[in-house]
Amino acid sequence: MGALGRVVDGVQNDKYAAWYNDERTVILAIQRQPGTNTVELVDAIRKLLPTFREQAPTGIKIDVMYDRSQSIRASVADVKFTLLLALALVVMVIFLFLRNVSATLIPSLALPMSIIGTFSVMYLLGFSLDNISLMALTLCVGLVVDDAIVVLENITRHMEMGESPLEATLNGTEEIGFTVLSMTLSLVAVFIPVLFMGGILGRLLYEFAVTIMVAVLVSGFVSLTLTPLLAAHLLKPTDHARHGRLFQTSERLFDAWRRAYERSLLRVLARPRTTMATFLLVVVATAAMFIHTPKGFLPSDDIGQIFAFTEAAQDVSFEAMMDKQRQVARLVQANPNVATVMSFIGTSGFSQTLNLGRMLIVLKPYGERASPEKIIQELRPELTEVPGIKVFLQSVPTIRIGGRLTKSLYQYTLQDADLDELHHWAPILEEKLRGLPGLQDVSSDLQIRTPKVAVEIDRDKAAALGVTPEQIEDALYSAYGQRQVSTIYTPTNEYWVILEVEPKFQTDPAALALLHVRSSKGALVPLNAVTRLSTGVAPLTINHQGQVPAVTLSFNLAPGVSLSTAIAEVHAMQEKLGVPETLLGSFQGAAQAFQSSLAGMGILLLMAVFVIYIVLGILYESTIHPLTILSGLPTAGLGALVTLAIFGRELDMYGYVGIIMLVGIVKKNAIMMVDFAVEARRTHGKAPGEAIYEACLVRFRPIMMTTMAALLGTLPIALAFGASGASRQSLGLAVVGGLLFSQFLTLYFTPVIYLYLDRFSEWLKHLGKAGKGRDPVVPSSPD
């Protein structure tokens, strides 16, 4: 063989190169199988690495470039800290209101009991402790104590009325039992529609919803069983006069707070029309805010890595691409926030072209660097200085959803059966996208300017010389196609035997004239004797989607721009441009999932409200009282949206989950008021105005306690601890803002709406008989 050519011991694909921190390397990527645990798999692999290093030849280093379990462990640790902080804050709230260690211990025990019970059900369902389930448990911290707080507060109130601990426990639990049942079942009902939600969001939120539903059901059971049991044995009658100065001061402050609420409530009840007008204004403002609030999809977690895609001219050589890729990698490596850089180019599963490359940039630990978004902004201007190559940077998405693997995160695909029309309009639309202010890193997968050499066979000459077209194709494939002619098998490996011309002849089209084809007569015929050669350009690849030619334009979002705004800009641009009707444009991947989820989340929110209405209607055997209970939702929604706007956050999927949580949380206040008023009217025959007035005052303390517990239980999520905390911050902000805003307004809106709807109910009963109704009667102050 050495007499006929040059024999080289090399790699199968010599048009592929990879570097690890500017050193040539071989990359081994390990992916877990579905259903396996990433952390456990990584631990098992790391146990094998010492053995691999011992067996490797001298001079070969085995390094771990990227370990996905590290970000998972850090994220889980962040959520665990958030969970523990929420536990501490909730217990602190209980103590500040009750100011008694024994009384504080009783509802506090509902926390571990509820969480342990939830763990048991999660284990039976095959759930794991991940970000989703831990975030659900964190949110539950402020919810699972609500029922216990309500029960305990009512028992305490009966003891303050002179009853013994046992009598107070029996009477207080019996009196509040239906209220607790209503609060628990209605909160569980919020998440029933989530269980039937499809798509990627449905799979993500299923575990979240089940975890919360189980925790709430367990807490409801604990509050009606363990809480009364502990109260009967641990609570003792106390004389307020024997308490210390701190207790007396705090009690005076709370009494002053309640008296101030009482006076303001009387003024509000005296002006029902003004209150209702304010409520309607809140409803309109909520709708307007919801329409105009920028909306996003799943925010990216800071997992400590950045993807970079590189693109050079379509006629670049492999050697030139290697040089440009290494220049870019060195600039990235020089950034003080970067720990390691893996870089690779060439023909592979990612790309069949030589002008595309990729980089995986691993950042330093979270506390030693800036955020990925800031690092990307730093690198962009530096990387533009490398001539002849474009660099597209993107923060790694939490979940890559469908679509193609493109140079930028979001995709817009053009389809047209007419290939010429598609190739004409795609560059025009790409240029228009570059001009949109909300977009950056606009790129296209259209490559139609690749140099080509066309070999046209002169069939008459070829036939005269005894050469067939198949023989010509066979000769060209043997010269340039890396033909595998044999395989050499050894005890430990196998080696392909590749036939091709020397590399120096592969880059010069003139070398085609040196090729010869053996004719059927056995003679060697020069290739240029039977062919005509011409140069030009041609598409390197023609992508299809649904069997129709397609070009995918990709883009990233400019800083501060939401995905909903970017999508609206793209739609407006295409309509203004007036593209042919045969050219179809559609978003793919994450952008498409966002569009479908946006409609899905709106339907989910409406279904959650509807299911709660049905559940409350069954519990109260009324169609009117559920409307009163649900009247607090617009105030919570407005508070959530205003808070997101104040902090500059868009309404992403986590924010939507926060609003759905508010649907279940906010109505608890109204349930406590309405249930007391209904019972007062049924048992004591009180007038509607007197009943709801007394309900507001009696339930003022448990309302404040449960709201503050839920608020402080969610506050750690809003504070966004750790690297992954920022992605979940919108959920915390939505819940905290909604609770703060609704807490103030529902204390006044609910009683007025109750009276109006009660009068409306009476009017329906006496339709055609009653005269024109009067405004709701306002009770006089007991003072």
Image (spheres, rainbow, N blue to C red):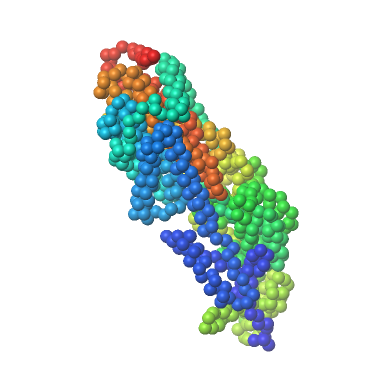
Q: Is residue 474 left or right of residue 654?
A: right
Residue 560 drawn at (x, y percent): 61, 41
What residue lies at 72% left-to-right and 52% top-to-bottom? 382
Residue drawn 41% across the image and 17% down it:
266
Query: Residue 612, can we see it?
Result: no
Compared with 695, 9 (above or below) is below
Q: Quadrant of the N terminus?
A: bottom right
Q: Is residue 174 above or below residue 81?
A: above
Q: In x, y percent, where is residue 512?
A: 70, 74
Q: Quadrant of residue 157?
A: top left
Q: Is residue 668 left or right of residue 620?
A: right
Residue 703, located in which quarter of the rendered image? top left
Quarter of the view holding residue 458? bottom right
Q: Residue at x 31, y 29 (%)?
A: 159
Q: Residue at x 69, y 71 (%)?
A: 532
Residue 614 is left or right of residue 399, and the answer is: left
Q: Eyeballing the image, is 310 above or below 566?
A: below
The extreme front residue here reads 242
